[in-house]
Every structure is written in structure tokens, then in C-alpha cells.
Image: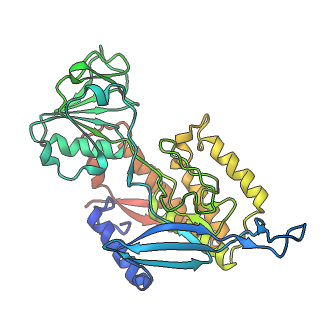
């Protein structure tokens, strides 16, 4: 937390406890159907009075907020099927479930060891005495390399942002080797790395793909009356207005698509904005359909906030998340001095945390996690507390 009494870098057990308490405090357990799987989302088409020729009914495609029909079933008892019509639906199924795997030439043909995705990882002791390659050096790759290195013979961590090598030799810390991006796998399971790395790895037993996830919405399909582009590998969902509302049918909204954010405050601001639009209490209404579609198209083609952008960065925020949170708060009608102080303090802590991690050897000691912050929202800052 930010009260200086507990760890600021919380563990998954504490996150679980927070979510449990959140549900209890707001009485959410009474409206949650646990153990269920949504199988179909369908946007209702609205019949208009008559078509221009007066012969047949026509579909009214100009209704902005059509009802949405959901069908779901109990996971342990698939014979139990349910269906209900809603004024609006929020899609909040996250984006850490469908693994995204890079195309590494020769991997399937030549590599004779085990290939797995980080989503399958659970126990580092299963890698005892093995040589492991972690492909990807962001949060998952760094954490897995650190944990696995305590048991493995050695660990390679492959990073597209690896700094220049010294004489073609990879940097080393303990039994972890920091190498450039994985280029290919050749005969004999030899793994080759980029940037003039002169040391192919020929003894790797396990390759762990720490390469992120794709978006997946199996309940939105050709029967949904909702055009949605979500191509595996692109990491882009379209067409969305402000990356929340479906541009054509805003009664379908998406929470939490963007990444590289402080998640819970960002989720909360999005949820407030969605509720305000549905309930008609928003201080800023969504623009007309034509404008929403135009802005969604421009957003999808821009490739994120960077210049030049990449399709894969469409939903990246990072340092841009604070203005986005302000925008959501304004749409929700809750932006005031207190909200600004809250967002600004979040930014200060986020920036300080980032500065402590910058330049660290991936998979090396994570001493930055011992930092404990006390929020000082009144001055939009924080204090570091010994813990």
C-alpha cells in the first residue's frame, strides 16, 4: 500500500485479498455468477417502422445504444444455460490468458527440448540442473529468469533491447546470461542471437516464451451483430472509441485493454466513465456515431502514442496513462482538485519506481521492491519509508 505500513510492491496473495475485500465492501458477490462461462454476446438489431418502399421491415442501424443479449453456462454443468438481455455490457475478461508466441525460424523443426509459455510457469524447482532460455526480458522474463536461476544450471535471457555486446560476448551476472533477441534455431538445437552475438547456445533444455499475450473474445463472433477486429499477433482491438466503447455500438464497452499502466486506478476511471454514460450522468457525452467511427479508425491506424507507432503498441500507455485517466475522469464528471492530486501522486510514485528499475540487469537482484512509499496527495508527492 501507500500508507507506509505495508509493502508497496504487493504479492499476489495481497492482490487477491484486496479484490475479495473490494467485492465484500461493495456487495458485489450478490450479483456475480461464479463458475460461469459466457458463450455468446449478441447486439440486438432494432426494427424500424417500415422501409422506404413500405414492403418489409428494416433494421434500424442508427440506434446508438442497442440492447445486448448474453448467453452463458455453468462450467461444471454445461447443461445449465442462461440468457438475459442487458442495456449495456462491459467486457472485462483481461488480456493475460491467450499466449502470444513469436515466430522463431527453426524452432519447431530443430529444437529438441521443451518449449513452453510463461503462462504455464508455476514452480522454478522443476528446472533444477537445466539450461533455460527465457525469450523476452520485460516483467515476466526478468522475474522468471531470477527465480529459475536459483535452481537451473544457467539461464539465458533474450532481450531485443539488449545493450551492445563486448567482443560478441554476452553480459553475465551469476549464472544468468543477457543476450540479444533470439534469431533462429539451427540443427542440433543451436540457438542463435542477434547483434553479432558470437556465442550460440547449444545446450538449452527448455525455452520459456515470455512474449506476452493476445486479446481474445471467443463470445464475440459472426453471430454477434458486432464488427470487431482482433487479429492474433496484432494486439489491437478495433473499432473502439477512446479504447473503451465500441464505436458503432457503445452499449458494448471494454475495460482494461491498455497495458503498461497502474491497473486498478486506471480500471476504476474507465468504469466510472462507462457508468456515467449508461446512467446519463456524464458531464461529457460521447460524440455522434460518425465521429466515433472516424476517431476509432484513426486510433487503430496510429499504432499507439509513439512516433512512429507500431500496431502492437495500439494499447500501450506508459507515461501517457495520466492524461488518459484525467480524460476518463472528465467524461465521468468526477474530475476535481482531489482527483488531480490523486493522479499526480500516482505519477510521482510510478516515475520513481521506474527510475529505480532503469538499467537493471534483467533477472538480477530486485532490491527496488524493498522501497515503501507513503502517499502525500496534498502536495502531489510521497515519502520513502524504511520497511
- Relative to 86, does residue 302 appear above or below in the rendering? above
- x, y percentage for residue 11? 28, 61
Q: Quadrant of the N terminus?
A: bottom left
**Extreme residue in the front direction:** 55
Residue drawn at the location 45% of the way across and 69% of the way down: 38
**Extreme residue in the left direction:** 129
**In front: 66, or 328?**
66
**In front: 362, or 6?**
362
Residue drawn at the location 19% of the way across and 33% of the way down: 113
In the picture, measured across the screen, residue 69 lies left or right of residue 358, that is: right
**In front: 236, or 111?**
111
- x, y percentage for residue 179? 30, 27
**In front: 161, or 135?**
135
Q: Quadrant of the C terminus?
A: bottom left
Q: Is residue 387 visible?
A: yes
In the picture, measured across the screen, residue 88 lies left or right of residue 36, that is: right
User: Residue 305 is drawn in which quadrant?
Assistant: top right
Badge count: 0
In the picture, measured across the screen, residue 242 lies left or right of residue 59, that is: left
User: Residue 201 is drawn in which quadrant?
Assistant: top left
Residue drawn at the location 58% of the way across and 57% of the way down: 222
- x, y percentage for residue 87? 62, 77
- Relative to 45, does residue 235 appear above or below in the rendering? above
Q: Can residue 380 be seen in this view?
A: no
In the picture, measured across the screen, residue 121 lies left or right of residue 319, that is: left
- x, y percentage for residue 341? 55, 65
Amino acid at each position: 500500500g501507500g500508507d507506509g505500513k505495508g509493502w508497496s510492491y504487493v504479492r499476489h496473495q495481497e492482490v487477491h485479498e484486496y479484490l475479495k475485500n473490494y467485492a465484500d465492501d461493495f456487495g458485489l458477490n450478490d450479483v456475480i455468477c461464479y463458475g460461469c462461462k459466457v458463450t455468446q454476446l449478441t447486439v440486438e438489431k432494432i426494427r424500424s417502422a417500415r422501409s422506404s418502399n413500405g414492403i418489409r421491415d428494416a433494421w434500424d442501424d442508427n440506434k446508438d445504444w442497442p440492447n445486448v443479449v448474453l448467453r452463458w453456462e455453468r462450467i461444471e454443468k454445461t447443461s445449465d444455460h442462461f440468457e438475459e438481455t442487458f442495456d449495456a455490457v462491459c467486457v472485462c475478461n483481461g488480456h493475460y490468458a491467450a499466449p502470444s508466441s513469436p515466430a522463431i525460424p527453426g524452432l519447431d523443426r530443430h529444437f529438441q527440448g521443451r518449449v513452453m509459455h510463461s503462462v504455464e510457469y508455476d514452480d522454478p524447482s522443476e528446472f533444477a540442473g537445466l539450461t533455460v532460455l527465457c525469450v523476452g526480458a520485460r516483467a515476466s522474463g526478468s522475474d522468471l529468469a531470477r527465480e529459475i536461476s536459483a535452481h537451473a544450471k544457467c539461464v539465458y535471457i533474450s532481450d531485443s533491447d539488449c545493450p551492445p555486446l563486448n567482443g560478441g560476448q554476452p553480459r553475465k551476472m551469476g549464472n544468468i546470461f543477457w543476450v540479444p533477441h533470439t534469431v533462429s534455431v539451427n540443427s542440433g538445437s543451436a540457438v542463435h542471437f542477434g547483434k553479432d552475438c558470437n556465442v550460440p547456445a547449444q545446450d538449452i533444455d527448455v525455452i520459456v516464451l515470455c512474449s506476452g499475450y493476445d486479446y481474445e473474445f471467443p463470445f464475440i463472433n459472426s453471430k454477434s451483430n458486432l464488427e470487431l477486429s482482433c487479429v492474433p499477433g496484432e494486439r489491437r482491438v478495433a473499432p473502439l472509441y477512446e479504447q473503451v466503447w465500441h464505436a458503432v455500438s457503445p452499449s458494448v464497452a471494454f475495460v482494461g485493454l491498455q497495458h503498461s499502466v497502474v491497473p486498478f486506478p486506471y480500471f476504476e476511471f474507465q468504469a466510472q466513465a462507462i457508468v456515467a454514460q449508461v446512467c446519463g450522468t456524464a458531464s461529457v457525452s460521447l460524440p455522434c456515431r460518425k465521429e466515433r467511427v472516424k476517431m476509432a479508425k484513426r486510433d487503430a491506424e496510429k499504432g499507439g502514442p509513439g512516433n512512429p507507432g507500431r500496431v502492437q503498441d495500439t494499447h500501450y500507455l506508459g507515461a501517457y496513462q495520466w492524461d488518459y485517466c484525467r480524460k476518463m475522469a472528465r467524461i465521468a464528471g468526477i474530475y476535481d482538485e482531489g482527483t488531480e492530486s490523486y493522479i499526480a501522486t500516482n505519477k510521482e510514485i510510478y516515475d520513481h519506481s521506474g527510475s529505480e528499475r532503469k538499467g537493471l540487469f534483467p533477472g538480477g537482484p530486485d532490491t527496488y521492491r524493498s522501497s515503501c512509499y507513503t502517499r502525500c496527495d496534498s502536495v502531489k508527492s510521497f515519502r520513502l519509508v524504511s520497511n
